């Protein structure tokens, strides 16, 4: 599908699905054909389905991430394949900088405040730094999905740094390499340091 063909689709739905693993039975009676038929009955012609959520769960058979513990089938493959059959465009959603599981398993990959402390999100998950090895984790998921699934595109969410900046070791090293000096903790607005 070309970008023009995708943008010509007029009824798009984003199915928000950040699911923790503590709810039993959540996928027990899932039926992809019925699921997609519900969309087409509502004249939906493009849908964003979740491949990776803020909890750090993947909804497909992944070799690099953690598949949702309550999922015993490949949700992305089943839904995307059924969407193909019913002429619904599919975007696969990837949560980028918010990830609870990665923050717990790899605290060294989290975004840091100016004092070097990990930066938790106020709700539940962690702010992850895309300049850390976590960025390669996101790229690896991208390769899995783009290379092996019948999707039309990817939706990357939360691709930014928590204000005012990330002060993790990875970001500090990149700043030092690019600018030849240490990263300023409180740059004056409008100065070269602030950019």
Image (tube, rainbow, N blue to C red):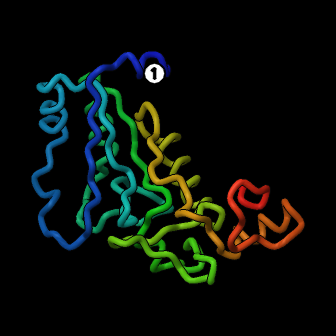
Q: Looking at the image, is 64 positioned above or below residue 2? A: below
Q: Residues within 10 Å of mark 1 (few under 14, many from 20)?
A: few
**Residue 1 appears in which quarter of the rendering?**
top left
Residue 2, percent from left and from top = 49, 19
Q: Which of 13 and 68 lies nearest the eye of the viewer?
A: 13
Viewer-proximal residue, 98 or 163?
A: 163
The reply to whether residue 85 is in sight is no
Residue 108 image point, x, y percent: 59, 79
Does dot 1 land on a helix, a strand or a loop? Answer: loop
Q: Position of residue 51 (x, y in %)?
A: 38, 50
Task: Tell me which residue sits at (30%, 34%) in the image.
Answer: 47
Left or right: residue 108 versus residue 169 is: left
Residue tagged 1? 1
Give the residue drawn at x 41%, y 22%. Answer: 6
**In front: 182, or 84?**
182
Q: Is residue 129 above or below residue 34?
A: below
């Amino acid at each position: 599908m070309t970008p023009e063909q995708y943008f010509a689709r007029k009824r798009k739905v984003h199915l928000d699905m950040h699911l923790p693993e503590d709810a039993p039975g959540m996928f027990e009676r899932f039926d992809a054909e019925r699921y997609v038929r519900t969309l087409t009955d509502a004249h939906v012609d493009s849908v964003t389905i979740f491949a990776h959520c803020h909890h750090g769960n993947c909804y497909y058979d992944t070799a690099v991430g953690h598949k949702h513990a309550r999922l015993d089938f490949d949700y992305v493959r089943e839904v995307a394949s059924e969407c193909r059959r019913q002429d619904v465009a599919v975007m696969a959603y990837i949560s980028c900088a918010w990830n609870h599981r990665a923050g717990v398993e790899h605290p060294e990959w989290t975004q840091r405040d100016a004092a070097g402390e990990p930066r938790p999100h106020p709700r539940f998950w962690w702010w992850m730094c895309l300049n850390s090895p976590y960025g390669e984790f996101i790229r690896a998921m991208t390769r899995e999905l783009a290379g092996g699934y019948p999707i039309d595109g990817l939706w990357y969410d939360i691709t930014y740094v928590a204000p005012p900046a990330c002060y993790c070791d990875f970001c500090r090293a990149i700043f030092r390499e690019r600018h030849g000096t240490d990263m300023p903790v409180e740059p004056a607005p409008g100065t070269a340091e602030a950019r």
